[in-house]
Amino acid sequence: MCTNRSLAAKRLGVSRSSLYYNHKQPVKDDELRRKIEAVHLKHPGYGYRRVAIELGINHKRAQRVMQKYNLRPKRRCKPPKKVQDRDRLEQKNPNILKWLCPVAPDMIWVSDFSYISFHGRFVYLATVLDVFTGEVLGWNVSLSHDQDFVLGAIRSAVSKYGKAPNWFHSDQGSEFCSEKVRSYHESHGILVSYSPKGQPWCNGMQESFFGRFKVESGDLERFQNLEELVSELAEQLYYFSEVRIKTRLRMSPCEYRRKWEQANFQREKTDDTRNRGIIKGGHCVPHFV
């Protein structure tokens, strides 16, 4: 046996002791695989970047191990097209997302709705998102999609946060372009923005949200009635805002808003103290650093 090992080592051009060496990397990779699988049980839509943030490891290591064991997040499918809006005249409102990047919450809200196939019929879900944070501000569920349906989602967002955005962006569907919705925006001083017709990617945040939301919610027909379905939708919407890590933020959207508001409050408090100035000859001279 020793002679065979010595000959094998000589023929391979390696030291004899290396034949007894047990590599540690496969063991470490297998341990990480189990951790990633545990993350996917709770967050089925997490790719390697979110997995890396969740586990506190380098994203390249997470990517390598996920590729090695073929660990993939659930993927989304393409949404259907609304053929009934093709012949409608295009609105002249600008596409604000093309040239304005928000630097604070509530500057731009975006909205859209999508269908959910449920026991032989469609249930519709409308959401309102904040472009800066990505959080779900308001939502509504209905068995039909009309102006009251999308207006319900908008009203829920305004009611929850006690404020309206500077801009509201959506596609040019008949629901969002209806007189009732436009009048609501006007009465609240909201400027309206639309994506060009036939270009859903211009509202990419909403398109991406619904795609991931449906995939990570799983088979919703596992629920027996609408009450159970709506309860699950509410839990998932809470999860997407309060728990699920958003890659560009490295935290959940609601956590990011809270931290931004806290930092902004401290900044304003500091600026207010600095700008009180020094009184000289009856005049206030602001002091800036």
Image (spheres, helix red, strand yellow):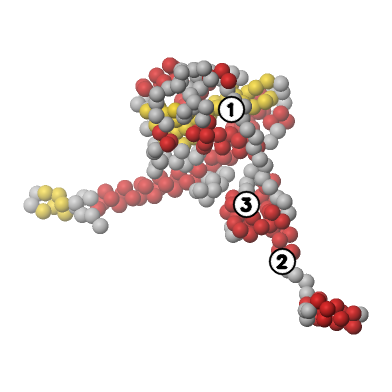
CB atoms at circles 3 and 2 under 8 Å apart?
no
> Which label belongs to residue 114?
1
User: Label 2 is placed on what type of residue?
Assistant: Gln
Residue 62 vs 89, above or below: the answer is below
Q: Distance between the residues labelled 3 and 1?
A: 27 Å
Q: Whole-percent x and y of residue 64?
A: 66, 57
CB atoms at circles 1 and 2 under 8 Å apart?
no
Label 2: state its secondary structure.
Answer: helix
> Which label belongs to residue 137?
none
Q: Whole-percent x and y of residue 41?
A: 69, 46
Residue 63 appears left or right of 159: right
> Which label belongs to residue 48?
3
Quadrant of the image occupied by residue 194: top left
Q: Which residue is drawn at 63% across and 23% down?
A: 123
Quadrant of the image occupied by residue 242: top right
N-terminal-most mark, 1 or 2: 2
Residue 20 appears left or right of 44: right
User: Label 1 is placed on what type of residue?
Assistant: Ser
Label 3: state its secondary structure.
Answer: helix
N-terminal-most mark, 3 or 2: 2
Residue 251 vs 153, above or below: the answer is below
